Image (cartoon, rainbow, N blue to C red):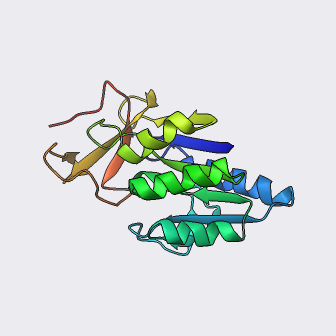
């Protein structure tokens, strides 16, 4: 079983690390497939904020993950925090059957609460790589994603999932992270 999990806050390089691992796997002669949940606005590819990208399928459930895995010995999934439990179980099953699964996603929501999908995946992971970003306030290691509304910390009562990047979120350390 090979199940690799890459986690961390927004802007920590999760997608870049996933793409790097997919590039290495392809260079080693593996058949590689990648996907990301349908909720993500940019479909058709995994895109790192640093520039590199990888072709990707849209994942809208177990069937789409199974289709992706039919032709691949290595499956990479970005934004894994958006997958539902049946899809997470499918990834675990693929790994048990011999597919190398590399999953990347946020470990915590903007409140600092663990994403259920990542919590379900982590105990079965063979390796967990936890990345950090740089806190925009003090320069320390950022482990949190700060959601903003009109430049100020968002209220804790807002929905847990709001897809966005620059302007909606920024990386913060534990000390600078605020939940209202």
Residue 180 in percent (x, y) is at 14, 37
Would residue 142 be found to the left or right of residue 50 on screen?
left
Residue at 50% across / 37% down in the picture? 122
Place residue 106 in its image quadrant: top left
Place residue 136 in its image quadrant: top left
Task: Work out whether residue 62 or residue 6 is closer to the camera in this orientation and state it.
Answer: 62
Residue at 44% across / 42% down in the picture? 120
Does residue 93 lie above or below 156 as drawn? below
Would residue 24 be found to the left or right of residue 122 on screen?
right
Q: Is residue 9 visible?
A: no
Task: Work out whether residue 97 or residue 165 is closer to the camera in this orientation and state it.
Answer: 97
Where is the N terminus found, in terms of image quarters? top right
Which residue extends farthest bottom? 44
Residue at 39% across / 40% down in the picture? 171
Does residue 83 lie above or below 126 as drawn? below
Which residue extends farthest top? 175
Residue 141 in percent (x, y) is at 47, 28
Residue 66 in percent (x, y) is at 58, 67
Residue 52 in percent (x, y) is at 65, 61
Q: Is residue 27 visible?
A: yes
Q: How many marks?
A: 0
């Amino acid at each position: 079983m090979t199940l690799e999990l890459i986690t961390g806050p927004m802007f920590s390089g999760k997608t870049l690390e996933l793409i790097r691992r997919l590039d290495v796997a392809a260079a080693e002669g593996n058949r590689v497939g990648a996907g990301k949940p349908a909720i993500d606005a940019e479909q058709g590819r995994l895109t790192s904020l640093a520039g590199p990208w990888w072709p990707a399928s849209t994942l809208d459930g177990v069937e789409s993950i199974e289709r992706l895995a039919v032709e691949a010995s290595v499956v990479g999934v970005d934004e894994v925090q958006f997958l539902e439990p049946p899809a997470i179980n499918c990834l675990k099953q693929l790994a048990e059957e011999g597919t190398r699964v590399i999953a990347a996603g946020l470990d915590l929501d903007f409140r600092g609460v663990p994403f259920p999908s990542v919590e379900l995946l982590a105990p079965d992971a063979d390796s967990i790589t936890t990345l950090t970003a740089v806190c925009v306030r003090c320069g320390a290691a950022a482990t949190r994603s700060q959601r903003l509304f009109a430049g100020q910390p968002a209220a804790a009562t807002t929905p847990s999932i709001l897809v966005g990047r620059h302007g909606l979120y920024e990386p913060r350390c534990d000390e600078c992270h605020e939940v209202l």
